[in-house]
Image (spheres, grey):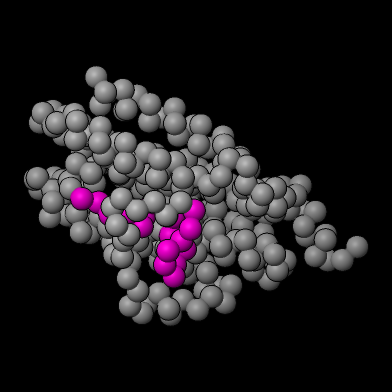
Amino acid sequence: MSEQTDITDYLAEGGKLSAPDNAPPRYRAELMRIMASFVDSELAGAAGFADCINMGPGVKERIAASRIVLEKHDHAERVLDLMGEFGANTDRYMQVHPWTERVDRDEDIGATRPGGDMRLNVFWYPIESWTDAVVMNVLMGKATVIQLEELSRCSYQPLAEAFREILLRERRHMELGEEGFARLQDAGADNAALASSFDYWRPRVAASFGGRDSARFALLKKFGLRHRPNADLLTEWEAMVEAVVKSVSA
């Protein structure tokens, strides 16, 4: 039995890796894919929220948006450092890249990435107002927490540890979104506008979980990089947002 097969069996049985050295080639490729998608999503998400800072109606809201932007850049840097240990050319991230680039508001890009990065497609859509930013943050914040809870159990220990630390901050980002949403409602925000934003962002955030029957999931599970299928994560997210949706519909 080859060394690579031994390692693959070890991972399938719940084993962990702590350094790039023994990672099989396909494992490395899938791990890099996960990390690149996270880094690019954090950078694109931060760029989108940076444009929203001055939309905030008050100092609290602008501080919250600024904090999210700062910490998302820090999260990206942490995982980017791990990518560098696998030999990734991290210098390209230091060059100019259009992280603020977005598609037209009404364009539906489905699962096709329109640009040259690995961001989740939800970060290709533009935010058009403060209300829109808050709603997007509420929905995507809940999705991010669920996704990071899943990834913080991955078999590559340095990444799992990084994700566990990042998860603490992302939970706070989610809470900041919820607090901002509550302030909008207390201030008498137009429920029709809130409902319109929910209708826009809900399917786009839902798509960030991937297909319900992902062909790649079996391989990721075998490598210990994933444990719960996309459908389970999506169902959990839908239950979390249902109460918020009802409050908008009331």
Q: Nearer the viewer, residue 20 or 112?
A: 112
The residue at 57%/36% (across/down) is: 231
Residue 117, visible in the rendered structure: yes
Tell me the chief SS of the magenta region. loop
Residue 73, visible in the rendered structure: no
The residue at 9%/45% (across/down) is: 57
Q: Nearer the viewer, residue 15 or 98?
A: 98
Q: Position of residue 241 (x, y in %)?
A: 38, 30
Q: Is residue 114 magenta?
A: yes
Quarter occupied by the N terminus: bottom right
Give the magenta part as a residue range: 111-128
The number of numbered discs placed on residues in the rendered structure image is 0
Residue 187, above or below 23:
above
Q: Position of residue 79 (x, y in %)?
A: 47, 63
Q: Is residue 130 magenta?
A: no
Left or right: 4 as drawn, with respect to 16: right
The residue at 13%/45% (across/down) is: 60
Quarter occupied by the C terminus: top left
The residue at 17%/46% (across/down) is: 130
Q: Residue furthest right?
A: 1
Q: Position of residue 169 (x, y in %)?
A: 36, 48
Left or right: 65 as drawn, with respect to 207: left
Left or right: 133 as drawn, with respect to 168: left
